[in-house]
Amino acid sequence: MPCQQEALVTANYPLTGDYWLVEIDSPEIAGSLRPGQFVNIRVSGGPSTFFRRPFSVYRVSADRTRLQVAYKLVGEGTRLMSTTLPAGARCDIIGPLGKGFSIPPRARRIAVVGRGIGIAALPTLMDEAVGQGIEVHGFISARDPANLVAADIFSEHGCSLITHTDTEQPGGLVTDHLSALLSQIPFDAFYVCGSNRLVRAVHRMALRTGVPAEAAMEQHMACGFGDCHGCVIEVNKDMLGTSKAFREVCHHGPVFNTWEVVDGRA
Ligand SMILES: Cc1cc2nc3c(=O)[nH]c(=O)nc-3n(C[C@H](O)[C@H](O)[C@H](O)COP(=O)(O)OP(=O)(O)OC[C@H]3O[C@@H](n4cnc5c(N)ncnc54)[C@H](O)[C@@H]3O)c2cc1C
Ligand code: FES
């Protein structure tokens, strides 16, 4: 059940590249959060901060009292987050929100694929999977090496990680590496967060191999809990895409099956 609170900020500092990390003391949200769920944060002080800003939870502390958000400085809201929420401040936060990732029963090996800010949704899934004894293979990409967030979490867990950056390897996709592995190693699930191009590429691999795949979607949001209908997208109701429906990303997602969000012919 989501809750709204004025939670204590315990840290807020530059992480790497364009990213900052804010840590918030909230046993209520951190304690019940499932991988892939998000929080909606109110930022104040600017002309366009009427709406809250949605963020994946990057990590939860081992005692499940604190949560971290890794956020990219993109506009007024995120810039104000970096300047108006120092350690000791109070942060108006709602969470946990949305439907997170599902791990198939008896899964032994999964692949997680992320690009840009999409990577921030993966560590909670990785923590959960590793805790269940599942082997996690990571494939992450960014504009440049400084923006490859979460690489340290893969090494902390001893998970294999393939990185891809536009500056070092122009052209191609990080999924090319996963595609090359598929004939050698069987996977039980794919998870992807990032660009539409990446989601389509993972969906094609899922179709080819019969492996279930989920994608965390991003959409501009207002309420964050299904009331305002401001975050609706069109989805497939069946795997062939013959029947369509409209769904709120905040409420029915942000995690969807890739067949729901990618055209069946992709
Ligand atoms: C479920 C969900 C989880 C998210 N998780 C993270 C996360 O973990 N880390 C992170 O850095 N960001 C995340 N985002 C994106 C984040 O919400 C936006 O970057 C943020 O709201 C931008 O606020 P701003 O005021 O700084 O930028 P604005 O001034 O509002 O916008 C600046 C630019 O960012 C674009 N933008 C704004 N909101 C979104 C959005 N919701 N999705 C995509 N582009 C947007 C705008 O079109 C504009 O180009 C997530 C979004 C969703 C929906
Ligand atoms: S943001 Fe209000 S319904 Fe999704």
Image: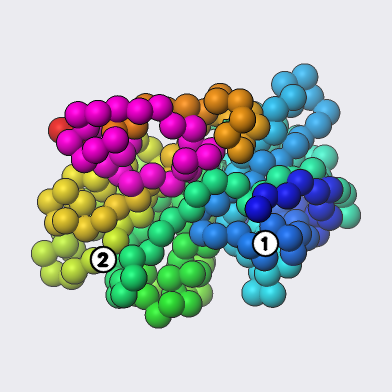
Q: Residue at x 14, y 56 (%)?
A: 209
Q: Position of residue 222 (x, y in %)?
A: 63, 29
- First in sequence: mark 2 or mark 1? 1
Mark identifier at residue 39: none
Part of the protein shown in magenta: 237-263
Quarter assignment of residue 185? bottom left
Q: Residue at x 21, y 51 (%)?
A: 206
**Which color mode does the image show?**
rainbow
The magenta stretch spans residue 213: no
Q: Quadrant of ligand 2?
A: top right
Three-letter amino acid code of the residue under disc 2? Asp
- Mark 1 lies on a secondary structure that is helix
Three-letter amino acid code of the residue under disc 1? Ala
The residue where tag 1 is placed is 30
Q: For the view shown, which residue lies furthest in the right direction?
A: 88
Q: Is residue 74 above or below residue 178?
A: above
Q: Residue at x 71, y 52 (%)?
A: 22
Disc 2 packing (10 Å; few <14; some 14–19; many ≥20): some
The residue where tag 2 is placed is 188
Q: For the view shown, which residue lies furthest in the top direction?
A: 47
Q: Can residue 20 be seen by looking at this rendering?
A: no
Q: For the view shown, which residue lies furthest in the bottom direction?
A: 133
Mark pair 2, 1: CA separation:
27 Å
Quarter assignment of residue 34? bottom right
